[in-house]
Image (cartoon, helix red, strand yellow):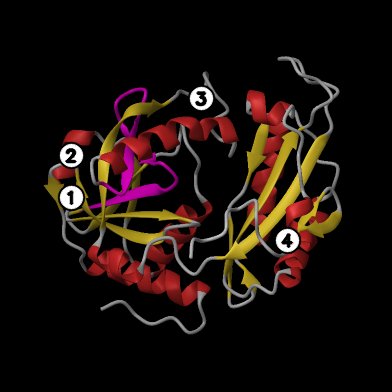
Amino acid sequence: MSSPTFADRDGFIWFNGQMQPWRDVHPHVLSHGLHYGSSVFEGVRAYEGEIFKLGEHTERLFDGTRTLGMKIPFSEAEINQACIDVLAANDITDGYLRPVAWRGSEMMAISAQDTQIHVAIAAWPWPQYFSPESRLQGISLKTAEWRRPPPESAPVFAKAAGLYMICTMSKHAAEAEGYQDSLMLDWRGQVAECTGANIFFVFDGVIHTPTPDCFLDGITRRTTIDLARARGYKIVERAIMPEEIKDAEEIFITGTAVEVTPISKIDDMTFKVQDITRNLMNDYDSLVRKHAIAAE
């Protein structure tokens, strides 16, 4: 039996201040956000009934909408409570929440000053993005043809929907060649991130990660840096060139969806899952899951 689509599910979605049956939420097809990308979203995880870093995610949602000139008609406290309510309404313990804000259908043109700002929050069960087996073995990346744009060209520090178009194309291209995700460079040719995750490299026992000057400084990225420093690991944020990758002892990615996941292959280069990555995987699991089982 096939899995239900995201449009055809039981449960409830919080939509513009009210909890509504899942199948009854229907944004109009002429919504500005659908045609022009005027939409900002968040991805949030719940573990054992508790929403992880909810306040930080909601703050980033509001920062992103302000960047796009959109004013959410609710307070941050109201959105936080709505996330909690959605989790409870759908009886979810371990899951993923998707708050999203977008411009409505009052105007259909480049200018959209008078559009209503809609907000919805959905949640669904989701134990892990990659299977435990994939995480322990490491996943594979293919270097993308598309590149992250400079800050002068796009609102790169907002989690804006339009910025993910090149991510979808890049990931589809990687999957077509048997890889699980894409490694994206920036417009300068420096290593940036994956399609939805930040990336870290271990060189000579020191953790290096690209400076987030044209992509999101991820919430999981910052959490992992704190965990690494608590273990006494040195962290270096700097420009990393693709020709350096071959010398890495370990590579891992971080994100709300992927958590801390090792990388075993980039293009034709292979890497081993070693102690620093395993330790940070276990530390992150212990932080978010009270009953985490250590990776061997």
User: In the rendered view, would you say 16 is above or below 258?
Assistant: above
Left or right: where 67 falls relative to 127? right
Q: Which mark is residue 83?
A: 4
Give the CA distance from mark 4 to mark 2.
42 Å
Q: Image quarter for residue 293?
A: bottom left
* Disc 1 crowd, CA 10 A, few/some/many (<14, 14-19, 20+): some
The kind of secondary structure the magenta stretch mainly shows is strand
User: Given the image, on which type of amino acid does mark 3 rest?
Assistant: Pro
Task: Report if the CB atoms under discs 2 and 1 are less than 8 Å apart.
Answer: yes
| Residue 248: numbered disc | 1
| Residue 200: percent from left, percent from top | 32, 50
Q: Secondary structure at mark 4?
A: helix
Residue 151 is tagged as 3
Query: From this viewpoint, which residue is outermost toward the front?
Result: 1
User: Does the magenta portion include 191?
Assistant: yes
Q: Amino acid at mark 1?
A: Ala
Vertical position of residue 261 compared to residue 170: above or below: below
Q: In the drawing, what numbered circle is on residue 244?
A: 2
Task: Tell me where the magenta segment starts and ends, as one range.
Answer: 179-202
Q: Taking 41 as reference, is 70 left or right? A: right
Quote the CA–CA distance across marks 2 and 3.
Answer: 24 Å
SS label for mark 2: helix
